[in-house]
């Protein structure tokens, strides 16, 4: 897998990892960042999915939390090993960043202008090889607080069983 890329990341201290109001740690902008800026590379040990499944879970007390980032059908980045602060970027259903894959490498870039002090986030869009049920959604809760919050870290492209949309709509109205 190639590790060379034409992507350049601006030098200088622009990001800081600290406690997040969303979940655990988060990554925050120290300066104003324009739209389209490459902020950081998601790095770690590149392993096969077979090895990722062998290592899973990273924390038996929180089995659905990992530092894996899908590269392709055969490979994943495990940021638990050799990772940087990119592993602390939280999920949001209304993200200000997005991942960009270039030659098997993952770069996090701004989707819009980000103000100094603002927490960075992107839509994890997790895909689980199982039917999307209310119980499965509950295993991957979202705490982003966005007005567009779908209540889960799971991908919006996965669909609920036919009877579930009404339950989802009622639950969404109760969320702050």
Image: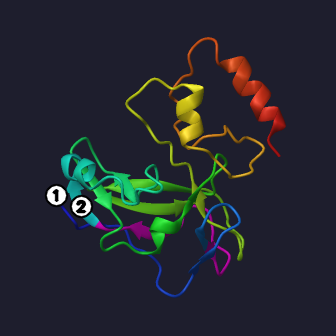
Sequence-wise, the earlier of marks 2 and 1 is 1
Query: Is residue 106 toward the left or the right of residue 28 in the image?
Result: left
Residue at image mark 2: 46
Residues shaded magenta: 28-44
Seen as rendered, the residue at the extreme top is 162
19 or 118: nearer the eye? 19
Residue 5 lies, in percent from the top left, at 28, 66
Q: Are marks 2 and 1 in contact (CB under 8 Å)?
A: yes
Q: Is residue 43 above or below residue 134?
A: below
Residue 156 lies, in percent from the top left, at 56, 33
Seen as rendered, the residue at the extreme bottom is 12
SS at mark 2 in the image: strand
Q: Residue at x 76, y 34 (%)?
A: 172
Q: Is residue 21 above or below residue 96?
A: below
Q: Residue at x 27, y 45 (%)?
A: 72
Classify mark 2: residues with Cα within 10 Å, few (<14), some (14-19) or many (20+): many
| Tag shown at residue 105 | none
Residue 150 lies, in percent from the top left, at 67, 37
Q: Say if the magenta span includes residue 31.
A: yes
- Which quarter of the figure has residue 106? bottom left
Can residue 156 be seen? no
Residue 37 lies, in percent from the top left, at 53, 67
Q: Residue at x 74, y 51 (%)?
A: 145
Q: Say if the magenta span includes residue 66.
A: no
Q: Residue at x 20, y 52 (%)?
A: 51
């Amino acid at each position: 897998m190639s590790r060379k890329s034409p992507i350049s990341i601006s030098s200088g201290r622009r990001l800081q990892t600290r406690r997040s109001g969303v979940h655990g740690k988060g990554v925050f902008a120290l300066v104003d960042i324009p739209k389209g800026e490459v902020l950081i590379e998601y790095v770690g040990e590149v392993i096969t999915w077979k090895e990722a499944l062998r290592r899973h879970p990273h924390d038996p007390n929180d089995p659905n939390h990992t530092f894996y980032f899908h590269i392709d059908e055969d490979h994943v980045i495990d940021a638990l090993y050799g990772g940087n602060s990119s592993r602390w970027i939280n999920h949001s259903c209304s993200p200000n960043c997005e991942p960009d894959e270039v030659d098997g490498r993952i770069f996090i870039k701004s989707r819009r202008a980000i103000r100094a002090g603002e927490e960075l986030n992107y839509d994890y869009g997790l895909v689980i090889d199982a039917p999307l049920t209310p119980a499965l959604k509950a295993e991957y809760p979202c705490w982003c607080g966005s007005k567009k919050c779908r209540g889960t870290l799971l991908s919006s492209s996965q669909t609920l069983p036919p009877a579930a949309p009404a339950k989802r709509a009622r639950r969404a109205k109760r969320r702050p």
